[in-house]
Image: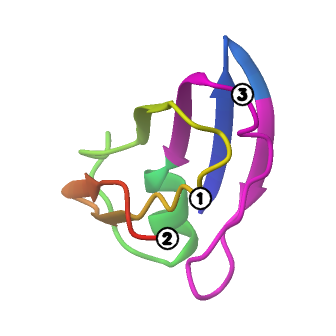
Amino acid sequence: MRVELIYDGTRIAAAETSSKGLLELEGMAKKGMYEAIFHVAGWYRSQQVALPSPPFLDVVTYRFGISDPAQHYHLPFKCTPWGYSCFRGGA
């Protein structure tokens, strides 16, 4: 899945998840608000999943804050074509 990372209105990283669904993004070195943008419908289409037109979920934006850049932030994102869950995971 394509994921973009935005800080202060600027895209600071963009990458595709691995075949295991993992992605490590660098760039969260500053305190503040971030957005992770997940291209859900594009990923499901690439997996040959039939989606309605328009898809129920297309692009999901996950806004989160970094209060201590020295900490590790694990941001699990779980989704189906119909819903998603996102949270701060353990270190």
Q: Which residue is mark 1?
A: 72
Q: Which residue is mark 3?
A: 30
Proximity of marks 3 and 1: CB atoms separated by less than 8 Å? no
Residue found 67% across the figure and 12% down from its top: 8
Segment colored magenta: 12-38
- Whether residue 54 is situated above or below residue 8 in the rendered picture: below
Residue found 45% across the figure and 54% down from its top: 40
Residue 86 on the magenta span: no
Residue found 31% across the figure and 54% down from its top: 87
Residue 14 on the magenta span: yes
Mark 1 or 2, nearer chain start: 1
- Going by the numbered disc 2, the residue's amino acid type is Ala
- The residue nearer to you, when weighing 45 against 11, is 11
Q: Which residue is mark 2?
A: 91
The residue at the far bottom in this view is 20
- In the rendering, at what x and y percent does residue 26 appear? 79, 51
- In the rendering, at what x and y percent does residue 35 appear? 53, 30
Cα–Cα gap, marks 3 and 1: 13 Å
| Secondary structure beneath label 3 | loop
Proximity of marks 1 and 2: CB atoms separated by less than 8 Å? yes
- The residue nearer to you, when weighing 45 against 40, is 40
Counting labels gives 3
